[in-house]
Amino acid sequence: MRLEPYLFALGLTAAVELALAALLGVRGVWDFLLILGANLLTNPPVNLLAELARTAAPRWTVPAVILLEAGAVLGEWAVYRRLLDRGKLPPLLLSLILNGASFGAGLLWMLYF
């Protein structure tokens, strides 16, 4: 198994979500480290399980990815709700926006590169 695609996906996710978080008003080193940590917890399992679904049951890939992404949103929301300094956005909305943006960036990367 090659690790490069998974490391790239994690790097892309972190770059997109941290940049967008800054644009959305997240401030403070702790908050950025928290967002990075939440991504370290959710991104690798989501990508590994999505790849497993793609190879084991290709027709179930899309539903699996939807469920995995929903799990990532909820998992990161739980972390943000408890530990993130309250900003302008509610933690669930922040998680939805950040995950949607990084998912979209990954999808665009897969489609065009």
Image (cartoon, grey):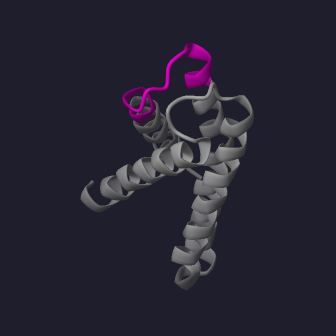
The image quarter in which residue 83 lies? top right
Which of the 4 image quadrants contains residue 63? bottom right
What is the count of numbered marks?
Answer: 0
At which x and y percent is residue 98? 47, 44
Taking 91 as reference, is 26 left or right?
left
Q: Is residue 25 magenta?
A: yes
Give 89 or 50, whichever is nearer the viewer.
89
Q: Residue at x 66, y 37 (%)?
A: 80
Indicate the position of residue 33 as horizontal and vertical percent values: 60, 23
Viewer-nearest residue: 1 or 66:
66
Residue at image location 40% in from the left, 52% down from the top: 106
In percent of width and height, residue 53 lies at 61, 72
Q: Is residue 3 visible?
A: no
Residue 10: in sight, yes or no? Answer: yes
Q: Does residue 100 appear to the left or right of 44 in the view shown? A: left
In the picture as drawn, the residue positioned furthest to the left comes out as 112
Q: Eyeballing the image, is 62 above or below 40?
A: below
Residue that sits furthest to the front in the current view: 88
Q: Quadrant of the C terminus?
A: bottom left
* Residue span colored magenta: 20-33
Residue 41 against residue 35 in the figure, above or below: below
On the image, the x and y values in percent for residue 95 come to 56, 46
Residue 113 falls inside the magenta stretch: no
